[in-house]
Amino acid sequence: MSEETRRDFIRDAALATAAVLVSPASRILGANDRVRVGMIGVGGRGQDLLRQAMAVPNVEVIAIADVYTRRWDEAKRIAPGIQAVDDHRKLLDRKDIDGVIVASPLHIHARHFMDALDSGKDLYSEKTMTWSIPEADECLAAAKKSDRVVQIGLQHESSGQLADARRWIKGGLAGKVTSVESWMSRNTPHGKGQWVRAVPADCTAANVNWNAFLNGRPDRQFDPFRLINWRLYWEFSGGNVTENMVHQIAWIMSALDLPLPSAAYMTGGVFSEKDGREVPDTIAVSFDFPGDVVVNWQSTFSNSRYGLGERILGSDGTIEHVAGATDMVSGESEETLRYYPEKVNRPDGTAQTGTSPDQNHMANWIDCIRSRKAPNAPVEKGYTSAVACHMANLSYRQKQRITLEEAKGAQPQL
Ligand SMILES: NC(=O)c1ccc[n+]([C@@H]2O[C@H](COP(=O)([O-])OP(=O)(O)OC[C@H]3O[C@@H](n4cnc5c(N)ncnc54)[C@H](O)[C@@H]3O)[C@@H](O)[C@H]2O)c1
C-alpha cells in the first residue's frame, strides 16, 4: 500500500467510525417493535407509499412534510391524526421517527437523502436516486459511511420475475448474452399530453412554500404549473429516462450483474407532445457495457401497443419480460416472464414461465430496519441506475456519444 493510499485508508476508516458513532440518533428496534415512519413529499406517489407503509404490520406513519397544504389534507384523509409540516427539517428533528420515506420531485432527492441520513433516520428514497451524477456520488459516499438502511424505490428489484431471470441466467440457460432490447410505450387522447396534470384552484403562493420547492434553483415568481408539472422541465426532472427507464435499466443490470455502462448514446426529441415541455417524448438509447453487452431502450408517448418489456438475447436462449402489451384479440394486457431455448445450441431445452412470487418492497425496507440487513434495492443499485440515466441524458443534451469518464467530468445542465 503506498503512503498516499494508506493515508486515504486511515482517513476513510476514521470518517466511517465517526459517522457510525454520530448517526444512530434513533432507537435500536427489536423484532416486534413498532416502526415509526415520517414522509417527505406526499403527492401522487407519496400517497401510494403512505398507504403501502400503513399496510405493513406494526408500522405507524406519524408525520409528513410537504410544501403544499393541499397534500396535508390529502394525507390526513388517509391517515387521520398525522402531523403535517411544510419544512422537512422539522420532521427530521423528531427523535421518535425511525425511518423516512422521500417522494419529492427529482431535483430535491439528494437534499432530502443527505438530510435524512444526517438526522440518523433510515431511508426509503424514490427513484431516480438523484438528479445528477455529482449528487449520486455524494449520496453513495454518505450512505456508505453511515450505518443507516437505505432502500431505493426501485420496486422491481423485489420482483419474483427478477429472481427467476437471475436464476436462469446464472444456471446458463441463456448462454452468452451480448444484446438486450427493451422498450416502454404509452399513449394519451389527442390534445391531452402525457404527464400533464391540471393545477388545482388552491395551488396559490399562500398555500405553497415555493422557496423550499425551488431548493436553490434560480429564484423566480411562484409558478403553480411548474410545481405540479415539474417532470416536464430539465431543472427539476430527467424526463422519461429517470421516470421509467431507470426501473428497466436497474432490472437488466441486476439480471445480468452488469457494472456501470462504459458509454451511452441517446437520440430523440419532443416530437409528439408539443406543449412547451423540455424533456423528450420519443427516445432511443444505446448503452455499451463492459464484457461485450449492448443494451437498447426505446420509448414513445404516442403509441401504447407493446407496453413495456425487456428481451435478453443469448446464444442458448431468450428471456422475455413483458408488461402491459395489449393482446390483439382480448384487448387485455398481462405481465409475464418467459424463457425460450435456442434450439441450435439447446436442442433439448424447453420453454419455461417464471413462477416466483414478488416480495413487498416496502415491507422489505421495514424488515431491514429491524434486522439491519441490506434491502433489495440498496444504495449501490440506486447509484448505478442513476448514473446510467444521467449518461443517457447527457448524451442527448450534448448530441453525441458519451463515455462514463466524460459523463463523470461533465457539468450538470439545468
Ligand atoms: N417507484 C415508482 O413506481 C414511482 C411512481 C411514480 C413516481 N415515482 C417517483 O416519486 C417521486 C414523486 O413523484 P410524484 O408523481 O408523486 O410527484 P408529485 O408532484 O405528485 O409529488 C411530489 C410532492 O412533493 C412535494 N414537494 C415539493 N418540494 C418539496 C420539498 N422541498 N419538501 C417536501 N415536499 C416537497 C410537492 O408538493 C408534492 O406534493 C418522483 O421522484 C417520481 O419519479 C416513483
Image (tube, rainbow, N blue to C red):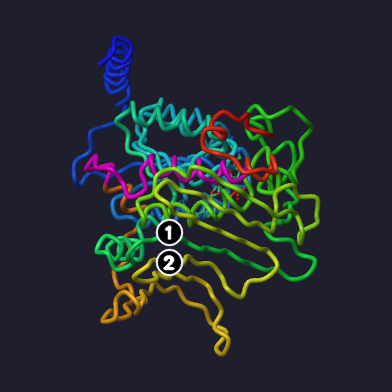
Q: Residue at x 76, y 64 (%)?
A: 192
Disc 1, SS:
strand
| Circles 1 and 2: CB atoms closer than 8 Å | yes
Name of the residue lying farthest toward the front: 344
Looking at the rendered image, the quarter that the N terminus falls into is top left
Examine the rendered structure and indicate whether residue 194 appears above or below residue 30. below
The one of 28 and 174 positioned closer to us in this rendering: 174
Residue 314 lies in quadrant: bottom left
| Residue that carries the numbered disc 2 in the rendered image | 313
The one of 63 and 12 positioned closer to us in this rendering: 12
Q: Residues within 10 Å of mark 2 (few under 14, many from 20)?
A: many
Mark 1 → mark 2, Cα distance in angstroms:
7 Å
263 relative to 358 in the view: left or right: right
Give, as a single range, the part of the protein colored magenta: 368-393
Residue 336 seen in this snapshot: yes
| Number of the label disc, if any, that sits on residue 178 | 1
138 relative to 215 in the view: left or right: left
Q: Of the residues shown, which amino acid type is indicated by label 2?
A: Leu
